[in-house]
Amino acid sequence: MTLQLNWSQAKTLFQRLGSVIGLLLLFIVLSVLSPDFLTTGNLLTVLRQVSINALIAFGMTFVILSGGIDLSVGAILAFTGAITASLMAAGHGMVLSVGAGLALGAVLGMVNGALVSWGRVAPFIATLGTVTLLRGLTLAYTQGSPIPVTNPGFAMLGGGYIANLIPLPVIWMAVAFILCGFLLRGTVFGRHVVAIGGNEEAARLSGVRISPMKLAIYGLSGLLSAFAGVVLTSRLYSAQATAGAGYELDAIAAVVLGGTSLAGGRGWLFGTLIGALLIGFLNNGLNLLGVSSFYQQVVKGIVILIAVLLDRRQ
Amino acid sequence: MRKLTFLAAAAATLLAACSQQGPGESTPAASSTAGGAAASGTPVIGLALSTQNNPFFVELKDGATKAAKDAGVQLVVVDAQDDPARQISSVEDLIQKRVSVILLNPTDSSALAGAVQSAQRANIPVITLDRGVDGAEVASHIASDNIAGGKMAADFLAKQLNGKGNIIELQGVAGTSAARERGKGFDDEIATTGMKVVAQQPANFDRAQGLSVSENLLQGNTDVQAIFAQNDEMALGAVQALAGKNKKILVVGFDGTPDGKTAVQSGAMAATVAQQPEEIGKLGVETAKKLIDKQPVEKSIAVPLKLLTKE
C-alpha cells in the first residue's frame, strides 16, 4: 500500500517536473546556439516580457483548477486598460485611475462568475459572450483609436526598474506569484478551488458554497487581467483598443504547459510560472536565432501538443 | 512592529532605487564580449515588421532581403503579428542581439516610443518604415508620399470625368497617418475641380467593410460617378457592391496590391495608386547601411507612387 502510494507520488512528481526539465533543456540549447541568450540583460528582458502573460495565467490557473475556463481575460485587459488611461487623461490621479481599473476588472470577472454559477452557463460559452461584449464596448469607448497616457509616474509601473536592474513588471509578477501561491496552498479558499475542480457535487455535499466561490474565482481572474492591462498600458504608454487579442490562449497554454489538468482539480501554480517562462524563452530564443515568425508559431504549437500528450499519458 | 519598520525601510530603499533606466542601456556595447552579432564582422540589421499577414509588408520584407544581400549585410526579421506589445518584445530581442540598426515598421504610431528610446539608449539607431512613431526621434523615416498619391487619384478622376461628377470616398482607419494624408491629398485636389465628394465614411481599410459601407452609401446617393477608396481592399469591396448594378462607376484604389492590380487589369477597378513596398524595404536597408558607414542620411525619405491603369 505504501509502495503503491509512493509510486503514484513519484509519477506525479515526474510529471510535474517535466515542465521544469523542459525549461532547463530549452535553456541549455538556446545558450549553446545563441551567444546573446545567456546575458543578464536578455534574461531580465524575457522576464519582463513574460510578466503580462504570467499575471493573467496565475488567475487562469485558479479558473482551470476549478474546472472552468476564462476566455475573456484579453478583453478585460483591453477594456480596463482603456478605462484607466482615459481616467488619467481626464485629469484623475494615478492611484484612483489604477484602483478603478482594477476594481472594474474584478467586477467584470464576477459577472463571468455569476453567469457560470447562477446562470448555469458553461464557462466556455459565458466567457465567449463577455469577450464579444467587452471588445465591442472597448471599441465603442475608444472609437478604435489609442488613448495616450501622459503621466510619468504611471509609465514607471510597466517601464521602470529597481536599482537600475530589475524591471518593475518582474516585481509585480513575483509578488502576484507569492500571493496567489499562498491563496492556493495556504487558505481554505485554495483547497475549495481544488475541491470544486475535482468533483463539484462532492464539494457541494461537503459544505463548499459553490456559487460564491465561483464568483470569487472568476473575480480573481478578472482582477489579475486588469492588473496585466494596467502594466501593459503603462509599457505601451497608451491604451490600445485591440490590446490583448489572443492573450487568453497564451495564458491557457502556460497553465497547461505547467502541468495543470484542463479537467480541473489537479495542478500547481509554480508549473504555470514555468509554463509562462517556457513560452517567453521560446519566443525570445527563436527571435535571437532569427527563425521566421511563421515557424515560431509551429514550434510553439508542437511544444503545447507534446505537453498535453504527456498529460494524457498519466 | 520591528518587522513593519524593516518592511517600510526596505520599500523606501527600493523606491529610491527606482528609475526608468534599464540595465546595460547606459553602457551599450561595453559588455559585448560574448561575440555574437557585433563581433562577427558582417553588420546585422534588424527588421521589425508589423505583420506578415498582409502582402504589402511581405513585399516590403522581400525588398529589404534583396537589398541586404546586395549590400552584404545580414538581415534579421521579426514579426509582431499586429500586436504592439509583441513588437516591443521583438525590438527588445533585437537590442539584445546587438544589431547595428533597427528598421521599424510600427504596428501603431502611438505605442512604440518606449521601444525606440530603449534602442537609442543602447546606441542603436532606428529607421521607421511606412508608419511613423509619435513621441520619439528616429534617424530617418521612409514612407510613400501619401499626399501626392491622393492628389494623383484626384487628377486621374478629373481627367476621366472631364472635371465634373460626384464622388464617394471610403476612408481608412481614423487617426492613421495613411488615412489622413491620402484623404488630404485627394480632398484638397478635388476642391480645385468641379467635382464633389458627396459622401465619405470610414471602412477601416477592410474589404468586407468596404462592401457594406459602399452598399449603404450607394443607397443614399444615386447620382455618383466614382468611388475613391483609400486602399485596394476597400476598393475591392466597393467593386463587389457594384457587381450586378447596371451603372458605370469608376473605382480607384490605393496601394497596388496583387489583387488590386488584377482588378485594374480586368477593368473592375479603373486605377490604383501603387505604392512600392519593395522600394521602401530596399531604401530602408540602404539607409541603414549608410548609418553603419557613418554617412549622413535624410531625416525623411518619400518613396514615389505610381498610378496604375489598364494596359
Image (cartoon, helix red, strand yellow):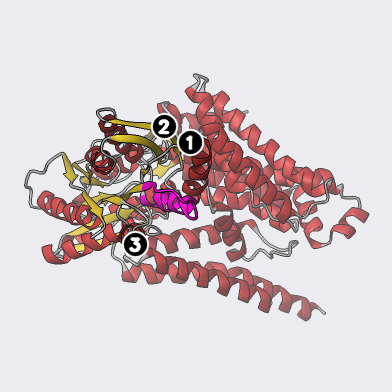
Residue type at mark 3 is: Ser
Residue A261, magenta (yes or no)? no
**Residue B159 position in % (x across, y down):** 23, 41
Report if residue B35 is visible in the image.
no
Q: CA distance from mark 3 to mark 1?
A: 26 Å
**Residue A311 position in % (x across, y down):** 65, 73
Question: Is the C-beta separation of discs 1 and 2 under 8 Å?
Answer: yes
Mark 2 sits on what residue? Answer: B198
Secondary structure under the numbered disc 1 in the rendered image: loop
Question: Is the C-beta separation of discs 3 and 1 under 8 Å?
Answer: no
Chain of residue at mark 1? B
Query: For residue B195, what is the image quadrant?
Result: top left
Residue drawn at 34 percent across, 58 percent down: B267
Residue type at mark 1 is: Asn
**Residue A69 position in % (x across, y down):** 69, 55
Q: Which mark identifies residue B157?
A: none
Residue drawn at 54 percent across, 38 percent down: A139
Q: Which mark identifies residue B221?
A: 1
* Direction top: furthest residue: A91
Dot placed on the residue nearer the N-terminal end, 1 or 2? 2
Secondary structure under the numbered disc 3 in the rendered image: helix
Secondary structure under the numbered disc 2 in the rendered image: strand
Residue drawn at 62 percent across, 41 percent down: A134
Start-end of magenta stretch: B232-250
Mark 3 sits on what residue? Answer: B266
In the picture, measured across the screen, residue B137 lies left or right of residue A242, that is: left
Chain of residue at mark 2? B
Report if residue A277 is visible in the image.
yes
